[in-house]
Amino acid sequence: MRCEMLPVKVIASEWMTPRYPEGRIEEMVADSIGLRCFSKKDISEFNHETYEKLRSDFGIYDEARDIALAVAVARKAMQGHMSVGKRDLAIFLSMQESSLSSMAICGEITEEGRTWLEPARWFSTIRRELELMPCEDVWVNAACASGNYGLAAAHDYVSQSPGRQALVIACFSMFPGSSHVFIDVGIAAMNTCRPFHTERDGTLVSEGAAALLLSNAKDIDRSNTCSFLGYGLSCDAYNQVAPDPSGDTALQSILDALDSAGLTPGDIDYINAHGTGTWVNDEIELAIIKRGGLQNAQLSSTKAYTGHCMIASALIEACICSQILVKGVIPLDLYRDSSIRALGNSHPKFVLSNSFGFGGANSSIVLGR
């Protein structure tokens, strides 16, 4: 017998990203979507010296910085919400798994030996820094769709029993070689990320982190919350780095998200597209949005503001969508194609956010106010 699913609220969200050099963000617009830039203070609050740390000389991923970003953004999301309690708070975490191989290599060539945090210690480090008691810890990795996969897993966990809550975290730190895969396959932007623009020339890798706090508590202040209504996940298994040209499985994730939310395509007011700024992705995504009957929804990609934060991108965009619902303001589209409906400032009630990752990992979530 299927148990009744409890309604899940997003009661706090926070995201951060440095301004990537090629982009220019107007302060007023950035503020409208809740942009926060990492400061030295945010990172310095995490004590690097307590933990073994990579030597930057090797030009390899520095997981100590990833942990610092995760702690910084989670701490900000938890501010003002510690009433949810430090017990029974599950953590769903997405970070770069490439560290497992790169750290092992680095460990072999340093005099000190192993210089990396074991995965199990990533959770204990975050809990110790945030003073959280032990609870469920879940690792989620689905490339650029990781944040939505983490939210889906957290939603299912929280909705199954009264009083449950979850902290979903995703982070991506830049390191030498971050952009190489995009350069190698010819989809790296020469200047800036311009999703859906007629002169777009690729995507731009950036750094960032995000955290969302989910709860099913009935006594929370609803003035600054939105509802997590549904999600859809699929995998096309077409190519390691390219989407399926048919878009069939990506469309299925959108339709499944609408179905689980109990909505129709016409109910969606705004779509935060995956919109990487590459010709292939944007063309396929526009096509499946039209096939799904969502062509009347307002559409944009906030990667024009943030760049592509890789494994953190989906959760960053989920944070933006939650803040769009709470503030009632849709961010301006920096590089709008004349063929796409212009954005308005109407208060959206339902938003859809798409994230499609390498390996064919597709995801869509629906949030509502």
Image (tube, helix red, strand yellow):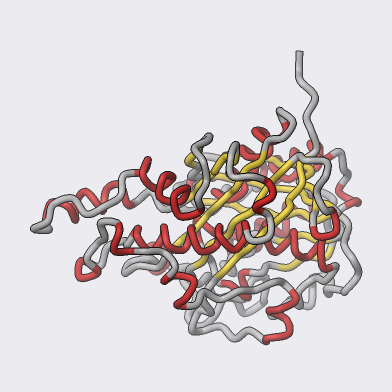
Query: Residue 334 location, x and y as percent?
Result: 70, 80
Q: Quadrant of residue 198?
A: bottom right
Identified at 13% across, 52% down, the residue is 113
Q: Residue at x 45, y 55 (%)?
A: 129
> Hey, which residue is sitting farthest top in the picture?
1
Quadrant in the picture for the C terminus: bottom right
Q: Position of residue 34 (x, y in %)?
A: 69, 72
In the rendered structure, the answer to whether residue 138 lies left or right of residue 246 reads left
Pick the residue in front: 64 or 19: 64
Q: In this orientation, does residue 52 appear?
A: yes
Say which quadrant the N terminus sits in.
top right
Quarter of the image where one finds residue 231: top right
Q: Is 42 or 179 nearer to us in this picture?
A: 42
* 109 vs 191, nearest the viewer: 109
Q: How many marks?
A: 0
Residue 174 placement, left or right of 130: left
Q: Quadrant of residue 302?
A: bottom right
Q: Residue at x 83, y 52 (%)?
A: 368
Q: Where residue 274 appears, x then y in whole percent?
A: 64, 59
At 73% from the left and 53% from the top, the residue drawn is 11
- Residue 170 in percent (x, y) is at 52, 54
Q: Is residue 258 above or below residue 21?
A: above
Q: Is residue 233 visible?
A: no
